[in-house]
Image: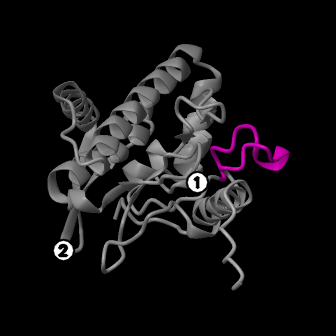
Amino acid sequence: MLDVTAISNLDGYMNGHSKLHQGNRAGSLTLLAGRLALNFANTESGRGSVQHFNHFEKGADLVTWAVHAKVITEQDAAIARHVLANNTGLAEDLLNEGRTLRNTVYSINAALAAGDAPSHDAMQTLADQYRDQLQSAELVGRGKQHAWIWNIERNLISSILGPIAFSALTLLTEQTHARIKQCGGNCCGWLFYDLTKNNSRRWCEMSVCGNRSKVRASRVRKQNDRLHPKSQRALPG
């Protein structure tokens, strides 16, 4: 299944002041979104803020993330790295097409998370991207199931972006949109698919953005208490 997600504790990725977590981390970002396409969108965060992180700086970064997210195998990644090292044009195409797909996935699902309709342009772009990536795929049987399979030696870009486009289209057309949410953490904006029974998840990870929100709220309350102390009861005369 393409949307199997490895979940581990978010390790401070959103802490923009930690030197440990600054820089490109395409191969170690926590995969906690519950859907492949949303994890792909989460390779960029803090859009429009001072703590903006973009982990796709070159084409090889998409290969690194694709291995990490189990979109391709280590063997396929070795092939891809060799090809990209000798073909800068293809590497640039992979980077540009990957960023376009990521922006499209983010635009559609951020709108759905806000209860809005995605733009027609974004949906058309996703449809076009899915159609383009599907051209090099092969439909194969796996027991009682069938799946689209991409061959990295046949089409390197599609082997990486095809499964993601498929996940994004499935999310849009077959999944419950009310479960698509966006973390409200400061300079975060990560997307996730809420798998809780009561659809109550608010944060990408409670131990990170959730706790930071609580800390900020507590500081605000204490500051307000200092600025506006409660009136003392008048002593009886």
Q: Residue furthest top?
A: 89
The quadrant of the picture occupied by the N terminus is: bottom left
Residue depicted at x 34% and y 43% = 110
| Color encoding of the figure | one colour
User: Is label 1 in a helix, a strand or a loop?
Assistant: helix
Q: The disc labelled 1 sits on which kind of residue?
A: His
The numbered dot on residue 117 is none
Residue depicted at x 59% and y 52% = 74
Residue designated by label 1: 68
Residue designated by label 2: 144
Which of labels 1 and 2 is toward the front? 1
- 177 or 147, which lies in front? 177
Q: Considering only vertical position in the picture, is 129 above or below 209?
A: above
- The stretch of residues the image draws in magenta is 14-28
Residue 154 is at least partly visible in this image? no
Q: Earlier in the sequence, mark 1 or mark 2?
A: 1
Residue 40 image point, x, y percent: 46, 45
Q: The disc labelled 2 sits on which kind of residue?
A: Lys
Residue 117 image point, x, y percent: 18, 40
Left or right placement of residue 157 versus residue 26 in this view: left
Residue 15 belongs to the span the image colors magenta: yes
